[in-house]
Image (spheres, rainbow, N blue to C red):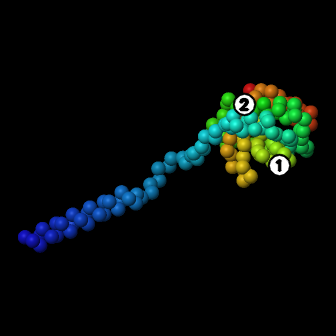
Amino acid sequence: MHLVFKILIVSFLVYFFSCSDRKSNPTTENTNSPVTAVIPDIPGINNEIYRKLLDSCTYIDYIFHNLPFSLSQSDDADINQNIMFIDINKPVGKLDPTCKPIARKFFLIKGKSAYDVDVYLSEKCNYYVFVDKAGKPHYANQMTESGRNFYNNIIKQVTGATSTGNQ
C-alpha cells in the first residue's frame, strides 16, 4: 500500500510541476494579429521653457530639409513672434508617424543652441517637436494659425509653390 501511495504522490508532483512550467513559459502561438507599435504621448512644453525662450532667446536658425535655403532671425520682435507660433495650450500628445518634418529649428541663448525643434507642416500635421541631440522627442506642441501662415509664405516665396498645411 505504501508503494502505491508513493507512486501517486510522485505522479501528482510530476503533473503539478509540468503544469506550472507551461504557465511560466507559455508557448508562442501564431494568432495572426497585427503588431502595432505603442507610440507614447509627448507632453507639451511647460510655462518655464516658454518663458525662458521669450526672455532669453537671442537667435533662431532654421535648416529646411528639402528647400535650397536656410533662415535666421536675430531681431527680438521677430524672435518673440516666432516663439508665439508655439501653441502652449495645445500639446500634440501622440506624434503621427506618417508625418515628416520640413525643417529643424534651433533656438539659441547666449550663442549656444538651447533647444532643437523639428517643424512639421502638412495637411494633417502642423506642430513643433522639441528633440534632444539624438533626435528623441521630449515635447510637442501644435502650431498656431499664424505659424502655419508664416511657413507657407516662406515656402511660397522660395518655391512659388501653393501653400501646404492649411486646415
Which residue lies most toward the left here? 1
Name the quadrant of the C terminus: top right
Tell me the quarter of the picture where residue 73 sits: top right
Q: Which residue is mark 1?
A: 112
Q: Residue at position x 82%, y 40% from top?
A: 57
165 is higher (above) or lower (below) than 20: above
Q: Residues within 10 Å of mark 1 (few under 14, many from 20)?
A: few
27 is higher (above) or lower (below) than 167: below
| Of residues 79 and 136, the one drawn nearer to the viewer in this rendering | 79
Q: Amino acid at mark 1?
A: Lys
Which residue lies most toward the bottom here? 3
Question: Which numbered dot is residue 87?
Answer: 2
Q: Secondary structure at mark 1?
A: strand
Tell me the quarter of the picture where residue 29 sits: bottom left
Q: Amino acid at mark 2?
A: Asp
Q: Residue at position x 82%, y 32% from top?
A: 80
- x and y, in percent, of residue 71 in the image: 89, 41
- Which mark is first along the chain, 1 or 2? 2
Tell me the quarter of the picture where residue 85 sits: top right
- x and y, in percent, of residue 44 in the image: 67, 37
| Of residues 89 and 161, the one drawn nearer to the viewer in this rendering | 89
Q: Is residue 83 visible?
A: yes
| Of residues 137 and 108, the one drawn nearer to the viewer in this rendering | 108
Name the quadrant of the N terminus: bottom left
136 is higher (above) or lower (below) than 167: below
How many angstroms separate mark 2 from mark 1 (CA)?
A: 24 Å
Q: Residue at position x 32%, y 60% from top?
A: 20
Q: Secondary structure at mark 2?
A: strand
Question: Which numbered dot is residue 135?
Answer: none
- x and y, in percent, of residue 164 in the image: 80, 32
